[in-house]
Amino acid sequence: MKTIRSDRAVYALSESMEPAIRADAGETIRFETQDALGGQVRSEADLMTDLDFSRINPASGPVFVDGAEPGDTLVVHIRSIEPAERGAIVTGPGLGVLGDETEHYATRILPVEDGTVVFGDVRLAARPMIGVLGVAPETGSYPTGTAHRHGGNMDTKEIVAGCTVYLPVAQPGALLALGDVHAVQGDGEICVSACEVAAQVTVEIDLIKGRQTAWPVVELDRSMVIVVSLPTIGEALDEATRQAVRALRDARGWTHEEAAMLASLAVDVGVSQLVDPNKTAKARIPMNLLGTDGFPFASSDDRERTSERG
C-alpha cells in the first residue's frame, strides 16, 4: 500500500499541484492527515487569534492517477478513517453562522475515546468524516477551505468510511488530495469548526472513463447524495435540487413535472455547511428510484452552466 505522509500537504487545489505520488486505478492509498488547524492548537489557551492562517486546512497529496483524463469520473472508495485520540474545536467573533453574536474567542480540547467525543459533560457518538476531499479544478486555483465542482471543503458528514465519492476529473491525473477530518460534525458546522482531528484515511481509487458527474456525488446507505457548493446557500440548495430532479427525470424517462413531483415525495434536500466561502448543500436520492443505469452523470448543459459559476 502506498502512503502519503502528512507533511506532503497542499493548501490550494489547482492544475499546477506537484504530485506526491502516482497510482493506478484499483490501488489502495493511505493518507496521513494533519488536523484542519495545522496542529497549532495544543491547549485551550491557543485561540484563533494566535494561529498562522497560512497553515489552516492542509490537504495531504495530491495523487496523480494514471489514466485519469478530463471528462472521466474519479471514484474514491473510503475504506477506513482512523482519528487521533483528541481533537479541538474553535470559534470567535465574526466566525460561523452566529459570528455577530459571538463575543469571545474560545477553544475546547475534545478527547476521542471509546467511540465517543467528549465535550464537557456531554458524550457524542464519534462519526469520523472527511471535510476536504477534492481534485484539481478545470480552471484557476481554489484554497482548500473552499468547495466547488471539484470537491474541496465540502464538510459533508456523509463522507465516512464505507461510502464512495465520485468526483469530476478536469485535469490529467485528477490530482486527488484530502484532509480536514472531523471526529464528529453536525450539518451546518455552525460555529466554523467541528471536532478537528489528525487522522489516517485509507481509500481505494478507481475510474469511470468517458463520463463525468456535474458535481461531487456520495454513495452511502443505498442513496446517492449530490453535493453542490456555491456562493450562497440558496444557490446551492436550488442547484442540488435541480440536479436531483434531472437525475430522476433521465433515469425514468419522465417529464420534468413528474420527476419534480417524485422528488417532492422522496428526495431529502439539506445543508452540509454554512460557514465556508462557498456554502454546501446536498440532495439525497434513494438508489432504487434511479434504477441500475440512473447514475447522475452530467449533461453538456450541466457542464457549461457549472463551469460558468463561481
Image: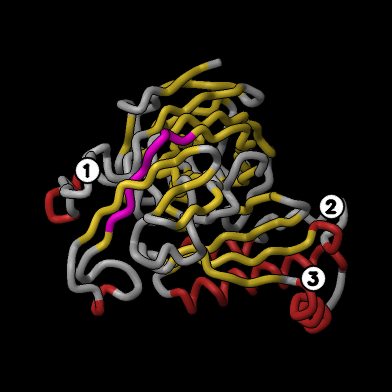
Name the residue located 62 percent from the left edge and 42 percent from the top edge. 72
**What residue is shown with label 2?**
293
- The quarter of the picture where residue 296 lies is bottom right
What element does badge 3 sit on? helix
Q: Is residue 85 magenta?
A: yes
Quadrant in the picture for the N terminus: top right
Q: Position of residue 288 (x, y in %)?
A: 86, 59
Query: Which residue is more in the foreground, 300 or 148?
Result: 148
Q: CA distance from mark 2 to mark 1?
A: 51 Å
Query: Which residue is more in the foreground, 241 or 213?
Result: 241
Q: Crowdedness of circle 2 by 10 Å Cα count: few (<14), some, many (20+)? A: few
Name the residue located 87 percent from the left edge and 51 percent from the top edge. 292
Of callouts 2 and 3, the N-terminal one: 3
The answer to whether 45 appears left or right of 309 in the picture is: left
Of callouts 2 and 1, the N-terminal one: 1
Badge nearest the viewer, 2 or 1: 1
The answer to whether 278 appears left or right of 66 in the picture is: left
Q: Position of residue 270 (x, y in %)?
A: 58, 70
**What residue is shown with label 1?**
43
Q: CA distance from mark 2 to mark 3?
A: 12 Å
| Amino acid on which the number 3 mark rests in the picture | Arg
* Label annotation for residue 176: none
